[in-house]
Structures are given as structure tokens and as C-alpha cells.
Image: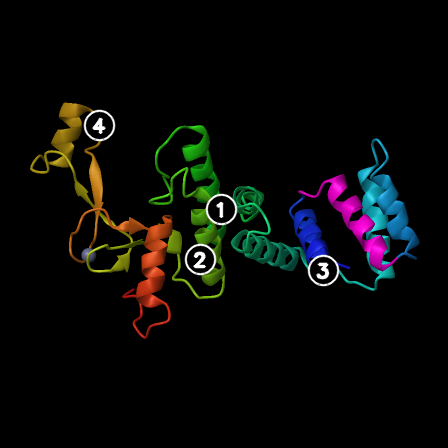
Amino acid sequence: MDDKQLQFLLGRRALNQAATKDYTDWAEALLYSNPNSENAEILASMGYERDPLTEEIEKYFLATLNDLKFNIPSNEQCIGDYVRLVCTQIISGEIDAIRGTELLEITYEKSDYTGLYSIWYGATEDIRNVRDYGEEVGFYNTGLTKDNLPSYLKSIAQQFLTLLDIELPGEFFNLSICLQCKHVSKPSFVRHEKPWLPAVIYRLIYNTQPAVRPVCPNCNADFPGMMQDFKAREMYLNTYHNTTQKPPL
Ligand SMILES: [Zn+2]
């Protein structure tokens, strides 16, 4: 049995993304190494039915795993293993980088739109930006273009695996890193237009809030890199990971 195929299937199942074909393909492959599993045989044959019932598929899937004396890990574990597997396959080229990234997009929704998995939302948005919407560069990933898409996505997968294994400061994705002094914190904001005009007066005259721009609270350099951006995270890792220097938080 190919453990990776089962890991893939269990991840998809935990994310409610597994299709009939995912199960029946797995059962079919399993029969090569376990030709005597009756339950796997039934499951595999469902691939040839027009509309097999989801409950029946689940029933024979669980029965097959029972035959194999395999206990399903928690959903959390299944999803974690799946994400690592897909990342590894993106990096090795075993899976197309765009398809792999699109597979991982759902993890953002399943994680309640927070944390590390937002990386996959940014990555898929940028695939759409440069491939479908005619943007020249990515919005979430500085320097991403249509031409470097596969290699860039591989770097994102590589970086994601690193981030999974290290401890990140709280609210990491709301933080920024200064491109000048490497200071890590939430950015400050300064008035962009007519900074001499008191905000109250500005609102009275223009009937809108004055525009602001983010700056580094440490050295006032403009536009510190936000951690939603691959390049900012790369700078963070290069500066503070695997070194004795700790981020000044
Ligand atoms: Zn700075």
C-alpha cells in the first residue's frame, strides 16, 4: 500500500474535499498489494457505479481500514500530514505547483481564516492575479509573475514547511519587518496628505479620513514589509531564524 496515497486521501477527507474517485482509486491501488481484501474490492468497484452513495463509500472505506488494522488519526493530524505531503510534492515536482497550491487554498477556510494557512490564500489569489486577471505582479507575493509562477510557488511551499516548525511571534501576519533596520512590529501610520492640517479640520473640509501610509515605528522608513508577503517573511527568517538574534518584540 502506498502510505502517501492514504495520507492524501485522509487529508482530503478531513477537509471534506474527498471525491468518490479519491476513494475508489485508492482502493484499486490497494488491491495490488492486498488482493484478498473484500471490502477494498467492493469500494474499488464503486468507481464503476454511476452514483455511488457517500454513506456506502464511507462504510466500505472504514471497513477496509479496519481490515488493515489502521486507526485514523484526528482530523487535525490528518490535515497537518496532508499539508506537509502536498508541500513536499510541490517542491519535488511530483505534483504541479499550481494544482498543489490550489489544493491547499481550502486550508485557509478550514482554519477559520487565520494564521499560517493564509499563505495559501495569498498564493492562490496571486495565481489568479497574474494568470487570469492580467496583473503583471503578485499582490501578496512581491516579485511573483506569470513566468516565475511554478518556481515561486515551490519557494512558498519550502518556506511554509520552515514556518510550520518554528515558533512565530503572536499575530505574526499583522506584523511588519522594516526593510531598513529589520525592526519587527505592527507598523505605525503617518498622514499622507496635508499632514499640517489637524485631522478634524481635514475631515470637515474633505469629508473623508486623511490618507495614511505605514512606516517603521523604529526608524520611520516608509512601507515596512508586511508578513503577508513572502519576501517579508523571507527577510524575517534570514534575519532572526537560525541566528542568535531574537526579533525585538
Ligand atoms: Zn526601521
Determine the residue located farthest toward the bottom in the rendered image.
244
The answer to whether marks 2 and 3 mark residues whose Cβ atoms lie closer than 8 Å is: no
Closer to the camera, 230 or 17? 230
Magenta stretch holds residue 138: no
154 shown above or below 71: above
Mark 3 lies within 8 Å of ligand 1 (Cβ measured): no
Distance Cα–Cα, label 1 vs label 3 = 25 Å
Residue at mark 4 = 208
Q: Tag 3: residue type?
A: Asp
Nearest to N terminus: mark 2 or mark 3: 3
Please tell me whether mark 3 or mark 4 is closer to you in this view. 3
Q: Which residue is mark 2?
A: 159
Amino acid on which disc 1 is placed: Trp
Residue 94 visible to an observer of this rendering: yes
Left or right: 46, with 92 as reference point: right
Q: Amino acid at mark 4?
A: Thr
The residue sitting at 42% across, 33% down in the picture is 129
Q: Report, in whole angstroms, how far the alpha carbon at label 4 lies from the one at label 1.
A: 34 Å
**For residue 120, which numbered disc appears in the image?**
1
Residue depicted at 92% across the width and 53% down the height? 38
Q: Residue at x 67, y 50 (%)?
A: 14
In terms of sequence position, does the residue under pointer 1 or pointer 3 come before the other?
Answer: 3
Span colored in magenta:
17-34
Q: Quadrant of the N terminus?
A: bottom right
Secondary structure type for disc 1: helix
